[in-house]
Image (spheres, rainbow, N blue to C red):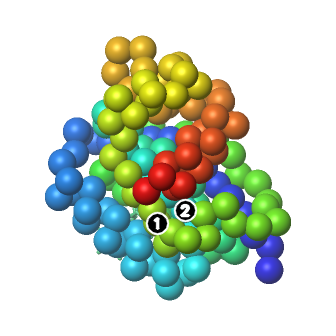
Amino acid sequence: MALMQLIYVSTAREEYGDDVLEKILASAVANNLRQQITGMLLYADGGFLQVLEGEAAAVEETFARIVCDPRHHSIFEITREPIADRNFQQWTMGFHRVRRAELEANPAYAPLIAGRINLAALGVRPGLALDILKDFAARY
Ligand code: FAD
């Protein structure tokens, strides 16, 4: 079975409270469990950063649904590549709402916090995108 990892950033249609984020996460967890998708979703200042990993066809089918979701836009794929092993096997979909202070604690994340938190800046830093996802997956 060929495993694939896909990372993207997107912009929320509006600034979301925990209620909306919990609904997104609930359907993500239910669907991902069924399709054996694992990953991590981060939300910060109206931006999403997500990694999906699993069997290639399942990841592509899931991502095709995600890109049609009107709750976000400006979806930018950062990486889509084959992987030998999963990095997020413990999460059907881990989630964390990232606070500015958490990013400020790590100097490597400084490029993301000029004014507002700007996860879209990760579009040109694929390695940093995976690092930040792994970092938060390990902490929460
Ligand atoms: P439901 O969750 O019941 O939704 C039915 C339809 O209504 C879908 O088309 C959905 O897009 C739409 N919808 C639901 N609530 C709202 C709302 N409040 N406003 C507008 N439209 C709404 N899904 C996954 O399976 N796995 C993931 O990892 C995943 N990650 C996501 C990450 C982000 C940032 C976002 C925004 C969505 C994510 N989703 C994920 C949800 C995905 O986009 C689909 O909504 C979901 O997969 C559809 O699940 P469902 O068929 O059970 O329908």
- CB of mark 2 within 8 Å of CB of mark 1? yes
- The secondary structure type at the circle numbered 2 is strand
Residue type indicated by callout 1: Met
Please report the residue visible at 27 percent of the width from the left and 56 percent of the height from the top.
21
Badge 1: residue crowd in 10 Å (few <14, some 14–19, many ≥20): many
Q: Position of residue 134 (x, y in %)?
A: 59, 50
Q: Is mark 1 within 8 Å of ligand 1?
A: yes
Whether residue 73 is visible, yes or no, is: no
- Residue reaching furthest to the bottom: 34
Q: Is mark 2 within 8 Å of ligand 1?
A: yes
Q: Position of residue 40 (x, y in %)?
A: 50, 57
140 to 13, vertically: above or below: below
Q: Position of residue 42 (x, y in %)?
A: 42, 48
| Quarter in which the N terminus is drawn | bottom right
- The secondary structure type at the circle numbered 1 is loop
| Quarter in which the C terminus is drawn | bottom left
Please report the residue visible at 30 percent of the width from the left and 51 percent of the height from the top.
71
Please report the residue visible at 55 percent of the width from the left and 46 percent of the height from the top.
135
Front residue of this view, candidates 94 and 54: 94
Please report the residue visible at 55 percent of the width from the left and 81 percent of the height from the top.
35
3D distance between C-alphas at marks 2 and 1: 5 Å
Query: Relative to 35, is 56 on the left or the right?
Result: right
- Residue position for label 2: 39
Query: Relative to 99, is 91 on the left or the right?
Result: right
- Residue position for label 1: 93
